[in-house]
Image (cartoon, grey):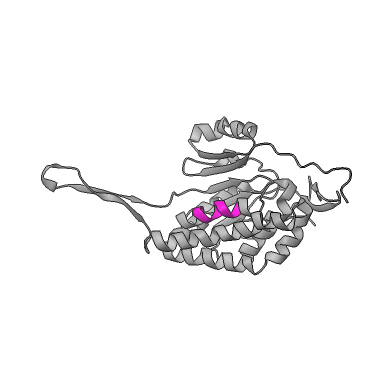
Amino acid sequence: MTLKSYACGNWYEARTDLVAVPSAVDGRTVASVSSSGLDVAAMLRHARTVGGKNLRALTFAQRVAMLHDIATYLSERKDALYEISFDTGATRGDHALDIDRGIATLFWYASRGRRELPSGHVVIDGSPEPLADGGTFVGRHILSPRLGVAVFINAYSFPCRGFLEKFAPAFLAGVPVVVKPATPTAYVAARVIEYVLESRIVPEGTLQSIIGAPGDLFEHLTGQDTVAFTGSLETSLKLRAHPALMRRGVRIIAERESPCAAVLGPDAD
């Protein structure tokens, strides 16, 4: 099975430079991954011009309702996600930490958004501020969506939860998403993304995926874009020092995970 990326409203299957993804349980090939030939610049344009426009047209209340519906849709497909997640080495208990908590995160953001966000398109930030003597000129700050893209570079651990916990706040904020899952567990993340898209709940352009290497993705980001990275300290430092990201003032949020080991004893049955 060759995993497909979702780009510019269509599924894209690479034909070259395929990388085999083995099962963590028995080593057999679970899927093949490649992003060769994927036009990431076009994906970012599509996100900004189509996805961003579609999201910003929605009120907070509408986005909240969509998050709740996505969570419900995924809840109805948890068993299928459990089944493919076993090949990552996950147990049933691990499913609760990744799949169940990932879906619960969507419900949580939907609930929080319903309670705390206004029904309109912007958030009022603070009280009016006098800008001239005698109150003849006053101003007020508002919070509105950035006009860029939220790019997620995710770790191999928590392929479901790692994606959904980033997706929920970006979606609520009205910012389209491009997600690049880690290759070793990309088959789980890709299935979650597939379910979200097949639900037809999210507007076009608000969610796209790069299954495989990011290519020249960073060369096309701007100061309106944000990169959210989960992974090693070493890789995060490379990202922060990337010339294109530094030159354009791209925001980088890095969650640096500690190294972990999974040791299987010789007496394991």
On screen, residue 123 versus residue 55, left or right, reads left
Q: Residue at x 61, y 31 (%)?
A: 238
Q: Nearer the viewer, residue 265 or 82?
A: 265
Q: Does the rendering let one see residue 207?
A: yes
Q: Is residue 119 left or right of residue 215?
A: left
Q: Foreground residue, 259 or 154?
A: 259
Image-quadrant location for residue 120: bottom left
Rendered location of residue 208, percent (x, y): 60, 55
> Residue 232: where, in percent of width, then height?
64, 36
Q: Confirm whether residue 54 shows in the render.
A: no
Point 20% across, 48% down: residue: 138
State whether the magenta stretch is mostly helix, strand or loop. Answer: helix
Q: Is residue 167 magenta?
A: yes
Against 68, is 47 above or below? above
- How many marks the image carries: the answer is 0
- Magenta residues, as a range? 163-170
